[in-house]
Amino acid sequence: MIDTFPTDIEIAQQAKIKPITEIAKALNIPENTLEPYGHYKAKLPLSLIDKKAVEKSNLILVTSINPTPAGEGKTTVSIGLVDALKRIGKKSAAVLREPSLGPVFGIKGGAAGGGFSQVIPMEDINLHFTGDFHAIEAANNLLAAAIDNNLQSKTRSLNIDSRSILWKRTMDMNDRSLRQITIGLGGKANGIPRETGFNITPASEIMAILCLAEDFKDLKDRLGKIYIGDDLEGNPVFAKDLNVVGAMAILLKDAIKPNLVQTLEGTPVLLHGGPFASIAQGTNSVVATKMGMSLADYVVTEAGFGADLGAEKFFHIKCRPSGLKPSASVVVVTVRALRHHGGATKEEYNIPSLERVKSGFSNAAKHIENMMQFGVPPVVAINSFPSDSQEEIDFIINACAEMGVKAVVSKGFTEGGKGSENLAEAVVEAIESKKASFQMLYDLEEGIAEKIHHLATKVYGAKEVNYTAKAKKQLLELHRNGFNDLAICMVKTPNSLSDNVKLLARPENFSITVREFEVASGAGFILPILGNTLRMPGLPSIPAAENMDIDEHGIITGLS
């Protein structure tokens, strides 16, 4: 790659984008079923889901090792892979998450792939898109308004204990000042004073629910099961008790429909939903995945952060209730990340060091082992960077081969689908070998502590799980309220297999500590919280927004 390599937005703006009707035609979607949003994006009806076709299609999950702060390029690899599958003659589609405005204006500057492996129209996708996030935000805040209205009601009061209310408002922007606020000040007309706060929209339970719902009926049922707090006698109160589930569902009537767009090479992509992987399932919607599998023979999807968070939750939280079964997996590795896990500082990420790569490979080895535990042996994609040395790459390929896993270099960023053909061929080979035998690592019927123990010991490699006094008390309350059979959605740092960001590579003989619990009963999972994970991020000292602009002709700059 040379110094004059174009920026992501320059590449996207120079692309020859096809009308969305042409993209739909490639998937045999009748034009009269499209709900166009302009010329280059459209909503798709749930009627396109075909259960028999889903069973015949091949689902490919892209995950990664524990990432550096910049990430390892899962989305870029996913897009390069789906383009490459099309290039080698496979009917393919990608199913990915939508970007959140918070990270776009905060650190990332954009989240639609990179280089020559992007989804377009890039500006639309990163900025508002089809309004799905706004609809989720509105539904979330309607419930919040109904809760505070009920606190003040004298005729239909549910006697909610204001100190127990867990439900917060949302906004799709990084704003740390809204994490903890006091509302209802200024007299009786303004409501009951209490402490609350804001979550960023991808952290809303409604986002998680939208991405797990099988259909509109299931969506409404899940919305009704949202646990908001307790009444004054200690009984749980749910969203359905406030009689606003129907109104919330109205706001989501279009948001539940997947969005159709395209890659730079004209390959179909369904973008839908965007729950964070740190505090939710971290993957696109069930309906979009099943729709993609109804329309294509090979469907590429990805799950956020490393496999210890994204892939584990994809399997246990998304696949279990939906019946989805992956045919293959891809673990994305970068030489830079292995140097990081081998002790390199940020300033040393681009300096070749075989010794550091050897030391850091233990992190990749654990993630490979984890995918094998789930019965989905991976292909390792070495996401190429200019600073990679051949001896480092050769070591990774040989070390993977010793584990019985094929590793290939992926150059999707610089070469698009052409640079990912070797990865596509390896993935097809893995699928055709029929070695996948998908299985879960815990049963829902087991106790909450037992399920957490399985994840901590089998996935992270911990020796034990500790609980604070607060967590122990909450654990009893979860059992008392009937939440014992829910899935587990661990909340921990993505940067380590442990709950300690400083423990890199493959730590041993460590313990993890559950600080407290939250519950997302509508989404169907319990959240054990390890450390301090924020549901409302803050802006960095120099946010990406400062480098963005639009000229008098409507040309946007600064997105990346």
Image (tube, helix red, strand yellow):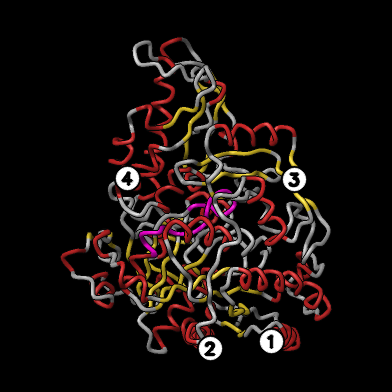
Viewer-nearest of labels 2 and 3? 3
Please tell me which residue is depicted at 61% across the width and 64% down the height of the picture: 307
Q: Earlier in the sequence, mark 1 or mark 4?
A: 4
Q: Secondary structure at mark 4?
A: loop
- Circle 3 crowding by C-alpha within 10 Å: few under 14, some 14–19, many from 20: some
Q: Earlier in the sequence, mark 4 or mark 3?
A: 4
Residue on which the image places disc 3 = 513
- Circle 4 crowding by C-alpha within 10 Å: few under 14, some 14–19, many from 20: many
Task: Calculate the distance from the C-alpha at mark 1 to the C-alpha at mark 4.
Answer: 47 Å
> Which sits in the foreground, 350 or 249?
249
Viewer-nearest of labels 2 and 1? 1
Viewer-nearest of labels 4 and 3? 3
Magenta segment: does it hold 283? Answer: yes
The amino acid type, in three-letter code, at marker 2 is Asn
Residue on which the image places disc 1 = 401
Q: Secondary structure at mark 3?
A: strand
Q: Is residue 396 visible?
A: yes
Task: Calculate the distance from the C-alpha at mark 1 to the C-alpha at mark 3.
Answer: 35 Å
- Circle 2 crowding by C-alpha within 10 Å: few under 14, some 14–19, many from 20: many
Q: Are marks 2 and 4 in contact (CB under 8 Å)?
A: no
Task: Calculate the distance from the C-alpha at mark 2 to the C-alpha at mark 1.
Answer: 16 Å
Q: Earlier in the sequence, mark 2 or mark 1?
A: 1
Q: Secondary structure at mark 2?
A: helix
Position of residue 337 relative to residue 272, above or below, is below
Residue on which the image places disc 4 = 252
Task: Calculate the distance from the C-alpha at mark 2 to the C-alpha at mark 4.
Answer: 41 Å
Please tell me which residue is depicted at 79% across the width and 51% down the height of the picture: 511
Q: Earlier in the sequence, mark 2 or mark 4?
A: 4
Residue on which the image places disc 2 = 422
Magenta segment: does it hold 471? Answer: no
Please tell me which residue is depicted at 76% across the width and 44% down the height of the picture: 466
Q: Which residues are magenta?
A: 275-289
